[in-house]
Amino acid sequence: MPANYPSWNDSIYHTHSNAKPTRWRYVKGVLAIRVENATYRGCLPFNGILELVSEQPEKVNGEDRYQVYCAWFGVKPPSKYPRILVGEGHFEIISNYSGEVIDNLSTQDSSLNEIPVRGESLPEEIEKTDNLIEGAVRTISINAYERNPIARRQCINHYGSSCYICGFNFGAIYGETAEGYIHVHHLKQLSEIGSEYVVDPVVDLRPVCPNCHAVLHCRIPAYTIEEVQEFIREQKNA
Ligand SMILES: [Zn+2]
Ligand SMILES: [Zn+2]
């Protein structure tokens, strides 16, 4: 079960008619369910694969209900999670699934979206989390460095798509589906960056796996690449 979820917030809505899958994550060898025309409390129908809590559905008011690990406006499994309604015959249980699963159902309406909690967010959301501390404008620029497709490509062309810290390679572990998937970490601290700053993809960026990326961002300012490499070395020698 993924551990990275924002906290439950009772003051925000947890359903919305415009909701749809907005975030995905990679999983390996989990119990999953492929759904077609699924809905959750009246949202628009969606298709995709979700990680299942249990192979056995629960009977609720005469209906079979499967529970899934998926965030919903700040829903935090396993104490709280959405129940997604699937019409009969429109789902398939997959017992040993590796690949992408839907990780969040949300809406583009920002007033209703979840607020990530520091230290609990997914690697993809870390920059959003920094938002709360560093201020929106600068965060968007940092975000852009790690997401900028041209800078990303030049970084990966130079360093390859294996994690610079631990060597993890998505293609080697998950096969073709995940080949080339990697995060890109921006080495510079926000405070070092002036308005004239232009990212150098080789000097300023490194390919890192989502795990190492999360660890890099466990502290503000972020740990260095060398520090995280040292954590791994220490653990191995412990
Ligand atoms: Zn790594
Ligand atoms: Zn980063």
Image (cartoon, rainbow, N blue to C red):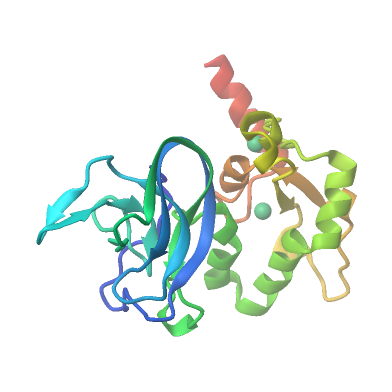
Q: Tell me if 40 is positioned left or right of 149 in this view.
A: left
Q: Position of residue 192 (x, y in %)?
A: 77, 63
Residue placed furthest toward the top: 237
- Residue under the point 52% across and 16% down: 238
Residue placed furthest toward the left: 61
Q: Tell me if 210 is positioned left or right of 101 in this view.
A: right
Q: Position of residue 6 (x, y in %)?
A: 39, 60
Q: On the image, which quarter does residue 180 sit in?
A: top right
Residue 182 appears in the figure: yes
Q: On the image, which quarter does residue 139 sit in?
A: bottom right
Q: Is residue 179 above or below residue 217?
A: above
Q: Position of residue 235 (x, y in %)?
A: 54, 23
Q: Tell me if 146 is positioned left or right of 118 in this view.
A: right
Q: On the image, which quarter does residue 140 sit in?
A: bottom right
**Most foreground residue, 193 or 118:** 118
Residue 116 appears in the figure: no
- Residue under the point 31% across and 73% down: 14
- Residue under the point 33% across and 54% down: 89
| Quadrant showing the N terminus | top left
- Residue under the point 57% across and 18% down: 236
Marks counted in the figure total 0
Q: Position of residue 143 (x, y in %)?
A: 69, 66
**Most foreground residue, 236 or 100:** 100
Residue placed furthest toward the front: 89
**Most foreground residue, 16 or 232:** 16
Q: Is residue 225 above or below residue 9?
A: above
